[in-house]
Image (spheres, helix red, strand yellow):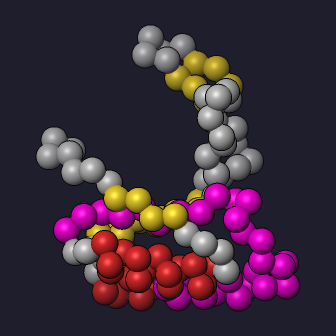
Amino acid sequence: MAKYLISFPSAAMVAPASEMEAVSRDSHTVIEEAKAAGVYVFGGGINESVPPVLVSADGTFSDGGYSWAPPLNGGFAVFELPSRQEAIAWAARLAKACRCQQELRVFGFDPAS
């Protein structure tokens, strides 16, 4: 089985404020169903009120992330599933619940991790 990252950037969340309570309820319902099915690994969202820190190999650090990369933000969930088709189905459920498209990626297996 592979682990799949299902995510969206903050800018994709365009649901009106009046729907946010329903978005929260519906997305948590999907997560609870994934937990019950034994496919949920973990999830959450990037805390955008805390700026990133860029840490070098020598331990020095500076405020901010990579200057050349788009910011990493939004929400994500990691599921462990037997097939890409099942991952697409779960991503579709989250897209419906969140009222925004979800990006699906597979983690490469690292036997040393």
Q: Is residue 100 magenta?
A: no
| Residues drawn in magenta | 1-30
Expressed as whole percent of the image width and height from the top left, the position of residue 82 reads 22, 75
User: For this rendering, which residue is in front, 30 or 69?
Assistant: 69
Name the residue: 70% across, 65% down.
Answer: 12
> In terms of image quadrants, where is residue 83?
bottom left
Q: Is 74 drawn above or below residue 39 in the view shown?
A: above
Q: Is 22 drawn above or below residue 6 in the view shown?
A: below
Residue 83 visible here = yes
All told, the count of numbered labels is 0
Expressed as whole percent of the image width and height from the top left, the position of residue 4 reads 36, 64
Q: Is 100 drawn above or below residue 46 in the view shown?
A: below
Q: Is 70 drawn above or below residue 40 in the view shown?
A: above
User: For this rendering, which residue is in front, 17 or 8?
Assistant: 8
Which residue reaches farthest left? 111
Expressed as whole percent of the image width and height from the top left, the position of residue 18 reads 85, 85
> In terms of image quadrants, where is residue 28?
bottom right
Image quadrant containing the N terminus: bottom left
User: For this rendering, which residue is in front, 103 or 47?
Assistant: 103
Which residue reaches farthest front? 85
Q: Is residue 28 magenta?
A: yes
